[in-house]
Image: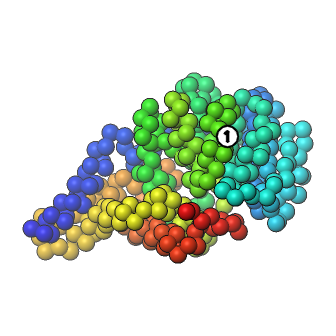
């Protein structure tokens, strides 16, 4: 009876996920550009880029922006870089690019948000593009985002960049990063009028400039480590529509050749996602065990019915991951590694909480963030 009960828990969990009307595992929400539009007039948009030690990527980021169309204004904030970020950016400077030397980080601010706050003082256009310094836009995507905003009456639109997927660890873990993000923030719910879920992908956000001012500027979210979703929530709570989706037309240039890099990226914000709560950490651990461990262990239970139910749960698990793998052109065989992948992400989450308990906090690009 115990084995059957455990198998049923795992099977029922996956059945519920499959039947959820908002399909958190689906990939139906996406936007891709189909052609370059160099003649597009983007004079109503300012691209705002916070950059700290991004000499290796900022050139491609700026070139991608300049290829989007005419009259796009670009403001880059060099956030106390110790490499050649400013020099590389200055090489692209011209009529439409301004490079601003960032001021020292004040207490109580996250570094990226402080850089955005400084650059935003120079924005006068109706629309603001918030774009990371390691993001490359494919031709035509910015004009298409603006068009979707106008057609659908959106206050904010965002695209989750296609992440670097070259090394073994990237192939193993990066598609799953998107998969788990959509499980936490179902895109269909976030894109609806339901205010309980609000999501954005911080690498590429197009937003009405007046809305940033209306919420109180970046100071309103100055301590947020998950700043993209915090911004979307502020906008949505004020009654404006937001939209987030996938794309092949926005690329992350940051490579993660080793597990340690991905581990650091995830553990930086995982404890924040759990609100530094032991209860939420334990609940997450139990949920991950039910979803990803019970179906596997159920195959070796003595009960034949438990084995059948567990096999069905495994099929459902693999089925929910296939759309993500297909979208990114990855082999479907990676879906068989999902229990291992989930275990690694759970370990990163525990690592993040242990850092918080030890008082070391999160670190990124030489800065430490210690929540109270």
User: Could you tell me residue 362's position as x and y percent?
Assistant: 59, 67
Location of the N terminus (image quadrant): bottom left
Image height check: is 328 above or below 200?
below
User: Could you tell me residue 40's position as x and y percent?
Assistant: 75, 29
Tell how many labels. 1
Q: How is the image coloured?
A: rainbow
User: Could you tell me residue 161's position as x and y percent?
Assistant: 60, 50
Q: Residue at 41% across / 51% down in the picture?
A: 183
Which image quadrant is residue 153 in? top right
Which image quadrant is residue 41 in? top right
Between residue 123 and residue 153, name the one nearer to us: 123
Q: Residue at 68% across / 50% down in the picture?
A: 113
Relative horizontal placement of residue 15, taking residue 143 as reference (left or right) = left
Between residue 356 and residue 33, name the one nearer to us: 356
Q: Indicate the secondary structure of the residue bearing disc 1.
A: helix
Q: Few, some or many C-alpha atoms within 10 Å of disc 1 (few <14, some 14-19, many ≥20)? A: some
Which image quadrant is residue 33 in? top right
Relative horizontal placement of residue 334, taking residue 43 as reference (left or right) = left
Q: Residue at 47% across / 53% down in the picture?
A: 181
Residue located farthest toward the left when viewing the structure as drawn: 1
Q: Residue at 77% across / 46% down in the picture?
A: 118
Relative horizontal placement of residue 273, taking residue 288 as reference (left or right) = right
Whether residue 314 is visible to the viewer of this picture, yes or no, is yes
Relative horizontal placement of residue 168, taking residue 101 as reference (left or right) = left
Image height check: is 19 above or below 39?
below
Location of the C terminus (image quadrant): bottom right
Whether residue 333 is visible to the viewer of this picture, yes or no, is no
Q: Which residue is disc 1 drawn over?
A: 217
Between residue 213 and residue 148, name the one nearer to us: 213
């Amino acid at each position: 009876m115990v084995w059957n009960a455990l198998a049923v828990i795992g099977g029922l969990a996956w059945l519920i996920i499959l039947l959820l009307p908002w399909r958190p595992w689906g990939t139906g929400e996406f936007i891709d550009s189909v052609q370059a539009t160099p003649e597009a007039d983007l004079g109503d948009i300012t691209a705002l880029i916070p950059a700290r030690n991004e000499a290796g990527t900022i050139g491609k980021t700026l070139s991608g922006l300049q290829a989007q169309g005419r009259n796009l204004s670009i403001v880059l904030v060099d956030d106390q870089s110790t490499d050649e970020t400013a020099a590389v950016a200055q090489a692209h400077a011209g009529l439409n690019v301004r490079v601003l030397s960032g001021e020292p980080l004040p207490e109580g601010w996250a570094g990226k948000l402080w850089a955005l706050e400084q650059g935003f003082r120079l924005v006068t256009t109706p629309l603001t593009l918030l774009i990371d310094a390691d993001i490359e836009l494919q031709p035509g995507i910015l004009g298409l985002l603006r068009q979707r905003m106008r057609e659908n009456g959106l206050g904010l639109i965002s695209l989750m960049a296609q992440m670097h997927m070259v090394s073994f660890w990237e192939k193993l873990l990066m598609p799953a990063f998107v998969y788990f993000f959509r499980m936490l923030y179902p895109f269909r719910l976030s894109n609806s009028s339901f205010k309980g879920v609000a999501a954005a992908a911080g690498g590429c956000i197009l937003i009405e400039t007046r809305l940033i001012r209306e919420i109180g500027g970046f100071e309103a979210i100055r301590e947020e480590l998950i700043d993209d979703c915090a911004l979307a929530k502020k906008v949505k709570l004020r009654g404006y529509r937001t939209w987030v989706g996938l794309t092949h037309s926005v690329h992350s240039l940051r490579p993660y050749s080793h597990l340690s890099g991905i581990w650091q990226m995830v553990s930086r914000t995982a404890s924040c996602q759990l609100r530094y709560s032991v209860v939420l950490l334990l609940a997450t651990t139990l949920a991950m065990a039910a979803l990803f461990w019970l179906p596997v262990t159920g195959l070796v239970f003595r009960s034949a019915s438990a084995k059948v139910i567990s096999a069905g749960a495994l099929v459902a698990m693999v089925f929910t991951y296939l759309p993500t793998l297909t979208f990114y052109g990855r082999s479907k065989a990676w879906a068989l590694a999902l229990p291992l992948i989930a275990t690694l992400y759970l370990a990163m989450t525990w690592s993040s909480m242990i850092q918080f308990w030890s008082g070391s906090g999160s670190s990124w690009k030489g800065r430490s963030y210690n929540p109270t």
